[in-house]
Image (cartoon, helix red, strand yellow):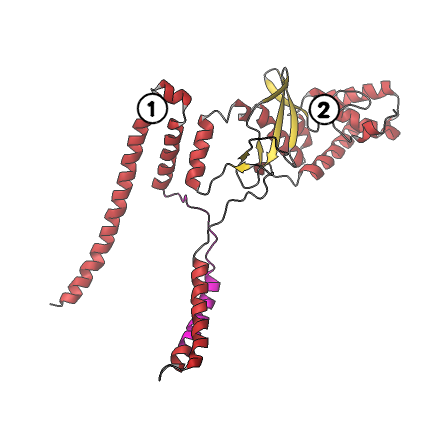
Amino acid sequence: MDLEALAKAAVAVLVPVGTLIGVGSRRSRLRHEIRENLTLVKELEQDDVIREHSLATAWLQGKITVDVAKLAGRSLGTPKKPIPWGSIVVTGLIGAAFGLWTWYLARDGFVWYVTFPGVASALMLISIMGQLTGRELPPGSSDLPEGATPVRTDTAAEQIASSIALAASSGLDGRFAEGGQVWVCYQFLTSMREGRYEEGLTFADHDWALCRVQSWLWNNRDSFGADLGELDSLAASLANHHEPTEAWAGFVETETNQFVTTWEPLDPDRYGAASHRRRIARDYDLVILAPVGSSGGYFVTSATAVPNALIFVVHRESDAWLVSNHVGMAPPTPGWPPVWWATQDPSIEALDD
């Protein structure tokens, strides 16, 4: 009997079995830990002080979420650059060639010039090691305003825990839900940038639509005349009934081109809303959408200029929030020309003193 063959066969069988047992035991321990933590969450929620004055429950729920993701086989590691296998193969072949040359030169004994191919071979090996290590991608935060601290952390596990804590701390309130102030701004922005102007009108209030019509008519007085009474009648007909049809089609075409040109480069998924509600009057709120880039969000501890932010005034009508202004910080005022409460408005600047 060949003992060596038997030993190899035993190793071939026992190693995979041992691996399976190890994996199985880890998964079993993880399930047990999740069950224990769920029980602990229920107990913590029964304590009024912990529930109302700390995030202990939220952080434990974040850990449970991470553990469930691990149990489901989801990757939670830091994002890494892909391994450049083509470059590694080429580098390996070159290194092997230099190594073979080194051996050939030193086969009968060491000679001083053998160091050149030897060093080249070693450098190729170091290059391969460099390509296999240090591939972690740092979180992108270069697109944040000065003084901002990104919310996103280095690891996906910490990101999940932070999200759970944010939700538990009421950072996500009804403003983000369907029909809320932030929700309607995102719907309005998405519709307008994609050229669906008439759909976007459903997310704006009547005064916004009327003022847009008035702005268009005022800028086209050469075509529609300068009689304010006639302009009033035409503006009301366009805003309320979308008639005359030909004039309405021209208005929609002009507006669509303007919004698409201005907003199409924006990616709504890379914008975030300010966490605190900003009320400016009864039934009027201010919503700020700021670019967060790849940071997933950020916070500031002092007054910070936020470049490229979008500011919306939203108005509540019959328990529904609608966009009232997209360029100023107050509801627009209908008139000839309408007032948008924005600086450098060409129509306002062209008025006589």
SS state under label 2: helix
The mark found on residue 57 in the picture is none
Residue marked by disc 1? 44
**Residue 97 in view of the camera:** no
On the image, which quarter does residue 55 sit in? Answer: top left
* Magenta extent: 72-101
Q: Residue at x 42, y 34 (%)?
A: 161
On the image, which quarter does residue 189 sit in? Answer: top right
Tell me the crowding category of disc 1: few under 14, some 14 to 19, or many 20 or more residues within 10 angstroms, Cα based: some
Q: Residue at x 54, y 26 (%)?
A: 176
- Specify the amino acid type for callout 2: Ala
- Specify the amino acid type for callout 1: Leu
Q: Nearer the viewer, residue 349 or 205?
A: 349
Residue marked by disc 2? 209
Residue 57 placed where, x, y %?
37, 27
Horizontal side of 110 relative to 301 (left or right) equals left
**Residue 127 in view of the camera:** yes
Horizontal side of 11 relative to 33 (left or right) equals left
From what the image shows, is residue 243 above or below residue 290? above
Magenta span has 86?
yes
Tell me the crowding category of disc 2: few under 14, some 14 to 19, or many 20 or more residues within 10 angstroms, Cα based: many
